[in-house]
Structure formats: structure tokens, C-alpha cells
Image (tube, rainbow, N blue to C red):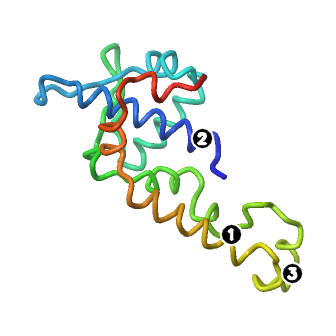
Amino acid sequence: MFSTTSKYAIRAVLYLAMLDKKNDNPEKVLKVGIKKLAEDLKIPTFFLGKIMQTLAKNKILTSYKGPNGGFSFNKNPDEISLLDIVRIFDGDEVFSSCILGLNLCNHEGFKKEDCPFAQDLDVCVDRISQYLNNTYVGKVAKSLNKLDDIFMI
């Protein structure tokens, strides 16, 4: 349902939040470099770099340049919903277009009541949207026990 970009963005933000919660010195800004992020998350560096810059442009993260640069949170992870991240990369269209990609739904004059799936699937999509809207990065990071929990196998 979600793009690979959204999935990678969520994993990267969760990774930062998990490191952030382990930070013993809250006065020191925790910055993580793109190479470390990409290596640990097993995401291509160039692709992840674009994702992180997009998150910075949208004020989720702050980007620091230079040899000691990296990324850190611009907002409190407890105030960033998973929906905030999905919207940046997939927009609201992910919740309004046909999740099955049926040709029926793309015809001019199409009405939702013409689709045998729309009524049932819309309920599911609405629940997913509500879940993402009410689920915050900080909360998820606190529920994960170790960094390996967010790595792909």
C-alpha cells in the first residue's frame, strides 16, 4: 500500500528515535551521518540521502553539513505521527485511490458504488489512516527493544 520511500523513511526516523532515547546527554544534539544510517538500515546511501533531505525540508529533521554533520530531529518524536511521514512521500492519494489498482476505478464517470470492493476497502483504508495518524514515532521507538527490530531481513 505504501511506497518503498515511505517505508524507508519510517525505518530511518524510528532508528533516529531509538538512538535519541538512548542519548544520556539531552543537551547534546544527537546527529547521525547518512553513511551510518544507510549501512545500518541496509538502504542505498543515495536513495536514503534524498529521503532524509526531504524529511529535513519538511521540518521533521534537521540536516547538519560538514565532517561532523548528520541528521537529528527538528521536532519531538512524540509529536511526529506515522501519517505525517507517509503524507510527505505518498500524499493523501494513497488513501483515496483504489488500493487494488482496478481498471474499473480509472474510467471517466466512475462512481464508488460501481466498485464491488470500495465500500469494504474504504473502511480498511480509513482504519489504517486513523492508526497512522494516532501512532507517533516516539511511542513506537519506545516499544521497540533493540535496533534490530527495525532492520529488514
The residue singled out by tag 3 in the image is 108
Q: Write down the residue under mark 1.
A: 121
115 w.r.t. 21: above or below: below
- The span from disc 2 to disc 1 (Cα, nearest Å) is 23 Å
Determine crowd level at label 2: few under 14, some 14-19, many 20+ residues with C-alpha closer than 10 A. some
> Which disc number belongs to residue 5?
2
Amino acid type indicated by mark 2: Thr
Q: In the image, 62: left or right of 121?
A: left
SS at circle 1: helix
User: In percent of the image, x 63 and y 61: which residue is there?
Assistant: 94
Query: Which comes sooner in the sequence, label 2 or label 3?
Result: 2
113, 36: nearer the viewer: 113
| Residue 67, percent from left and from top | 34, 13
Residue 96 shown left or right of residue 108 in the figure: left
Residue 93, quarter of the rendered image: bottom right
What's under tag 1, amino acid-wise? Leu
Res 95 quadrant in image: bottom right
Distance from Cα at disc 3 to Cα at disc 1: 21 Å
- Label located before the other in sequence (3 or 1): 3
- Going 42% across and 45% down the picture, which residue do you hit? 57
Q: Position of residue 86 (x, y in %)?
A: 52, 52
